[in-house]
Image: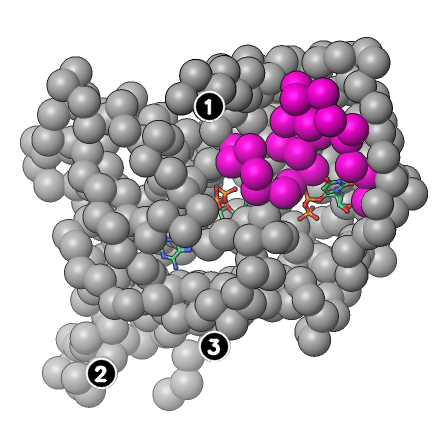
Amino acid sequence: MVARDVADWRRLATRTIMSGGDGDAKRRATIQKARPRAGEPRRVLVTGGAGFVGSHLVDALLARGDHVLVLDNFFTGSHRNIERHLREDAPKGRFEVIRHDVVEPFLVEIDEVYHLACPASPIHYKFNPVKTIKTNVVGTLNALGLAKRCKAKFLLTSTSEVYGDPLEHPQKESYWGNVNPIGERACYDEGKRCAETLAFDYHREHGLDIRVARIFNTYGPRMAMDDGRVVSNFVAQALEGKPMTIYGDGTQTRSFQYVSDLVAGLMALMDNDVGFIGPVNLGNPGEFTMLELAEKVRAVVDPEAKIVFCENTADDPSRRKPDISLAREKLGWEPTVKLEDGLRMMVDDFRERIEERAAR
Ligand code: NAD
Ligand code: UDP
């Protein structure tokens, strides 16, 4: 008999076991949802946990009492982002860091995996494009394999880049995208598209409990000051009295989400108990041109800040804005932090780091 969908397959597999049928179906049918060990905190693996988003997620997980393992190769992540959890007053015994590359297999005992490991800034993911693909494909296979072995829940941080230079606006999850498969951004875009495919295949083939988030441009404290993304560039440049670099004519648009909103969305997606797996857009639907963003940064940092126009990069998406109806409906989630307010919090952090650097 042939299964038509996952529910059908589970029914068939169970029936096979009852009748002492084939071993393969028996093995697959034993996969159950992960449950925290009785009396012990939930063990959560955050790959890429020393990075910008990962470190904020780690803070939130530790704050609610989880045991957190960070696995990171520190390519773009930093010790500064997580070191306070290793100090004296740290949540003892509930925080561990493993220096490891997700491209190599790894074994740990966990109940949930938030899989973030991957450089997110275009200048970083284009630095070694083949490694970026390996991270997205082999790294995601390794993380999925681990989740399967541990019967853990698995959440993938995918990206709005799966929509490429979108022909539909705003972007809904049902849109299949417009990606140049041989362009300079493809190592990231196609890598993430393949990672989504792998997650869904593990779900269909092995019954793995997956979640897929498509994250739109996110900003906030702890972004690497030299990571080349537009918000970090503009804020650092304005604070250091340098002109803000606008690529192209500055009419291209993005929608900027503050990092705490994203973390709340990721946790709502992982925790929802209605079995909603996504893919789901997590982003702030406010849409700004890069010229408008420069004005916002001027208003917060320095009204006299200058701008300079530079050549744009290849395949730069011209418009991007999430449709977040699905996240609102399924997760009751929506962003709450306005761009002006988020920029102020980010500027405080950048100022502190610039002063620290100057004092060294
Ligand atoms: P980031 O570069 O600050 O963090 C990525 C982390 O992954 C870093 O700590 C880095 O050292 C680690 N890493 C990279 N390659 C690795 C490897 N092979 N093995 C182990 N660790 C590795 O980026 P971020 O902004 O925090 O993004 C986190 C995740 O969210 C990424 O998967 C990214 O694609 C996704 N995302 C982010 C945004 C955004 O605007 N920040 C938008 C869309 C998607
Ligand atoms: N950009 C810019 N100046 C910069 C960096 C980026 O004008 O110093 C533009 C870039 O061309 C793109 C947008 O800002 O149109 C967002 O770029 P970013 O690298 O932050 O993220 P992307 O959404 O392209 O992944």
Q: What's the residue type where badge 3 is placed?
A: Arg
Please name which of the two marks, 1 or 3, marks the residue nearer to the observer: 1
Percent position of residue 106, x then y = 22, 62
Please name which of the two marks, 2 or 3, marks the residue nearer to the observer: 2
Magenta residues, start to end: 223-247
Model colouring = one colour
Magenta residue check for 222:
no
Marks 2 and 3 close (CB-CB < 8 Å): no
Magenta residue check for 245:
yes
Please tell me which of labels 2 and 1 falls first in the chain. 2
Percent position of residue 199, x then y = 44, 63
Please tell me which of labels 2 and 3 falls first in the chain. 3
Residue 357: mark in rendering: 1
Marks 1 and 3 close (CB-CB < 8 Å): no
Residue 4: mark in rendering: 3
Please name which of the two marks, 2 or 1, marks the residue nearer to the observer: 1
Q: Is residue 337 left or right of residue 260?
A: right
From the Cβ of disc 1, is ligand 1 less than 8 Å away? no
Q: What's the residue type where badge 1 is placed?
A: Arg
Residue 165 falls in which quadrant of the image? bottom right
Q: Is residue 26 left or right of residue 58?
A: left
Residue 24: mark in rendering: 2
Please tell me which residue is depicted at 45% across the width and 46% down the height of the picture.
76
Q: Is residue 246 left or right of residue 142?
A: right
Q: Is residue 156 left or right of residue 153?
A: right
Please tell me which residue is depicted at 38% across the width and 38% down the height of the picture.
78
**Which of the pair 224/107 is nearer the observer?**
224
Please tell me which residue is depicted at 83% across the width and 13% down the height of the picture.
304
Query: In the picture, which quadrant includes the C terminus?
Result: top left
Whether residue 292 is visible to the viewer of this picture, yes or no, is yes
